Image: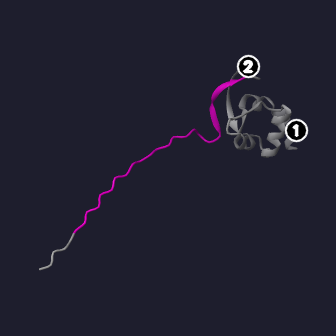
C-alpha cells in the first residue's frame, strides 16, 4: 500500500492600515500673512473651489492674489482665508 505524502503550508499575513487626511484639506496652522489660524488647501482643491485652472491659481499665488506656501515636497498650499477674502478677484478672473 502506498502512503500519500501531505505537505501543510501555513502562511501568516500582516494587515497595514494607512489613515490619510481628507483630500485637499490640511490642518489648521497659522498664516503669517493673515495673522491667524487658517486651513490650507491643495492646489487642486483651490482650483476646484474657485473654478480657475491650476495654472491661474499658481499665477495668482505668485502675484500675491492668495497667500500660499510650498511644502518641503514642493506642493503648493493655498490659505483658505485669503482665498475666501478675494472673491472679487476670483470673479474677475472667471469672466
Give the x, y percent position of residue 57: 80, 40
> How many numbered tags mark residues here?
2
Where residue 62 sits, quadrant-wise, is top right
74 left or right of 93 in image: left
Give the x, y percent position of residue 46: 73, 39
Residue 88 or residue 7, whichever sits in front? 7
Residue 94 or residue 69, whichever sits in front? 69
On the image, numbered disc 2 is attached to which residue?
35
Where residue 85 sits, quadrant-wise, is top right
Please say which color scheme the image uses.
one colour
Work out which residue is located at the far top of the displayed protein and give it: 35
Q: CA distance from mark 2 to mark 1?
A: 26 Å
On the image, numbered disc 1 is attached to which residue?
92
Q: Which mark identifies residue 23?
A: none
Q: SS of the residue at dot 2?
A: loop
Labels 2 and 1: the sequence-earlier one: 2
- Residue 24 colored in magenta in the image: yes
- Dominant SS of magenta comes to loop
At x 84%, y 40%, the residue is 59
Q: SS of the residue at dot 1?
A: helix
Q: Quadrant of the C terminus?
A: top right
Give the x, y percent position of residue 88: 84, 33
At x 71%, y 44%, the residue is 44
Q: Quadrant of the N terminus?
A: bottom left
Residue 5 or residue 74, whichever sits in front? 5
At x 55%, y 40%, the residue is 20
29 left or right of 94 in image: left
Give the x, y percent position of residue 48: 73, 44
The residue range painted magenta reads 6-31
At x 64%, y 36%, the residue is 25
59 left or right of 34 in image: right
Amino acid at each position: 500500500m502506498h502512503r500519500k505524502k501531505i505537505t501543510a503550508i501555513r502562511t501568516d499575513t500582516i494587515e497595514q492600515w494607512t489613515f490619510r487626511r481628507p483630500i485637499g484639506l490640511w490642518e489648521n496652522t497659522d498664516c503669517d500673512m493673515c495673522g491667524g489660524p487658517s486651513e490650507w488647501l491643495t492646489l487642486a482643491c483651490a482650483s476646484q473651489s474657485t473654478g480657475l485652472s491650476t495654472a491661474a491659481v499658481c499665477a495668482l499665488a505668485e502675484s500675491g492674489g492668495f497667500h500660499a506656501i510650498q511644502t518641503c515636497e514642493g506642493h503648493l498650499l493655498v490659505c483658505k482665508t485669503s482665498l475666501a477674502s478675494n472673491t472679487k478677484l476670483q470673479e474677475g478672473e472667471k469672466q
